[in-house]
Image (spheres, rainbow, N blue to C red):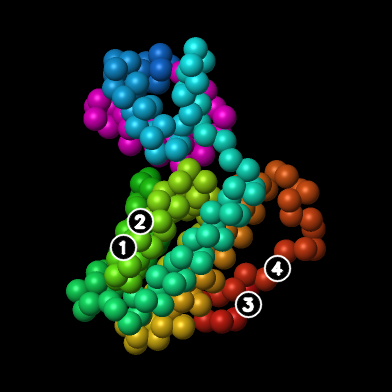
Amino acid sequence: MAKPRDVYEVLRTRIISGDHGPGSHLAEEVISEDLGVSRTPVRTALRRLADDGLVTIEPHRGAFVAEYTRADIDEVFELRQILEERGARLAASRRTDAQLRKMDRLVNEMAVIAAGRKPSRLDDLHHNNKHFHELVLEAASSPRQFRIATSLAQTSVTLGTFFYYSDEDIDRSVEFHRAITHAIRLRQSQVAGSLMSAHLAVAQHSFVSQRFSDQSEEHPAGNTAPTPRPDGLQS
């Protein structure tokens, strides 16, 4: 039985993990019975999720998981690449020692989470990843960029990327975070920016490949580009 204050988190995790797919009807009475709470906290949670862009509420029909297309995903990832590449470049020249220590801690935590098999593993990776990318943007000391980039990252379009990752994808993400942090440590601006751009390009490829795996026309056989690795090789 969920506590009223936990309803939002439970529903949010279910949506970003794909348990409630795009377009799914989120019936208040069903959720209320499932979670063992009254309909009031369910209604409150659905309004919050609508504010987040994860849910749409239609008069006389109810709440539905927001739908998005391949074009939506590509657009958001490409915009993130532009903004976060710049963020990583600036972070390499403007970061503080305290921010660098936080990056190191997040990377180490991510490696531990990735190696474990806790039931909360994917959700923990999602939150760790969010904190890492926000920290890099914070270290860039560019308030406008921070607001725009974090807003993009928290749209329903790219939330929950880790829930579609294979173990190989997760390990690669850890290594990208480690390499980006190392470049920022050495104040190698161009390297940090290039690594961040490649990291997001790989995330886009992995997410789209899994998200649309049942739509063969999106990924014709024999037409898959090699995936960049943090060490500059191809996989």
Q: Is residue 163 visible?
A: no
Residue 143's tag is: 1
Residue pointed to by mark 2: 147
Crowding near pointer 4: few (<14 within 10 Å), some, many (20+)? few
Between circles 3 and 4, the one closer to the viewer is 4
Q: Which residues are magenta?
A: 1-27
Q: Earlier in the sequence, mark 2 or mark 3?
A: 2
Q: Is residue 214 visible?
A: yes
Is residue 132 or residue 56 the one in the foreground? Answer: 56
1 vs 4, front mark: 1
Is residue 17 positioned above or below 141 on the image?
A: above
Image coordinates of residue 35 in percent, x first then y, are 34, 23
Disc with the residue nearer the chain's start (2 vs 4): 2
Residue 18 included in the magenta stretch of the image: yes
Label 3 amino acid? Gln
Sequence-wise first label, 3 or 4: 4
Residue corresponding to mark 3: 234
Tell me the quadrant of the picture where the N terminus can be found. top left
Q: Residues within 10 Å of mark 3 (few under 14, many from 20)?
A: few
Label 2, residues with CA under 10 Å away: few <14, some 14-19, many ≥20: few
Report the Cα–Cα distance between label 3 and label 4: 10 Å
For disc 4, the marked residue is 225
**Dot 1 and dot 2 residues touching (CB under 8 Å):** yes
- Tell me residue 13's x, y (percent): 40, 39
Query: Residue 6 at what x, y percent from top left?
Result: 27, 32
Q: CA distance from mark 1 to mark 4?
A: 35 Å
Q: CA distance from mark 2 to mark 4?
A: 32 Å
